[in-house]
Amino acid sequence: MDGQFKPCPFCGCDKIKLSSRIVVKDNDIKTVYRVHCTDCKAAIDEYDTNYQAIAAWNMRSYENTKQ
């Protein structure tokens, strides 16, 4: 998974990790994913797939502005 994460938008660190955990809610078991910076601990919300979590981490608001 190296190289698929943009650097941290807060500290610039490139040591970014994808983590997962199992959650149980109303007798439903699922895995959720989160991306975080190992340096400053910045993190995004949890997502249902690793692809959604990676895409959310890599999204930068300044890249979506129309000129």
Image (cartoon, helix red, strand yellow):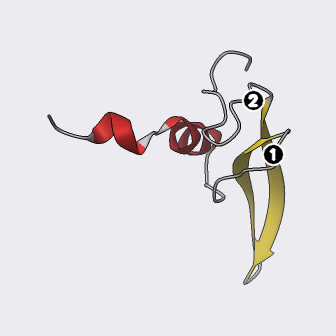
Residue 57: where, in percent of width, then height?
58, 41
Q: Nearer the viewer, residue 35 or 7?
A: 7
Give the quarter of the image for residue 27. bottom right
Residue 6: where, in percent of width, then height?
60, 27
Quarter that holds the C terminus:
top left
Kindly check if marks 1 and 2 are in contact, taking CB atoms under 8 A apart as contact: yes
**In screen coordinates, is 20 left or right of 3?**
right
Amino acid at the residue labelled 2 = Cys
Q: Residue at (68%, 30%) from the top-left corner? A: 12
Amino acid at the residue labelled 1 = Cys
| Label 1 or label 2, whichever comes before in sequence order | 2
The residue under label 1 is 40
**In screen coordinates, is 45 left or right of 23?**
left
The residue under label 2 is 13
User: In this view, which residue lies farthest toward the top?
Assistant: 3
Relative to 59, say whether 29 is above or below: below
Q: Residue at (80%, 73%) from the top-left corner? A: 24
Residue 17: where, in percent of width, then height?
79, 35
Relative to 41, say whether 17 is above or below: above
Q: Nearer the viewer, residue 8 or 59?
A: 8
Give the quarter of the image for residue 2. top right
Q: Nearer the viewer, residue 48 or 43?
A: 43
Quarter that holds the N terminus:
top right
Q: Regarding mark 1 in the picture, which secondary structure is present there? A: loop
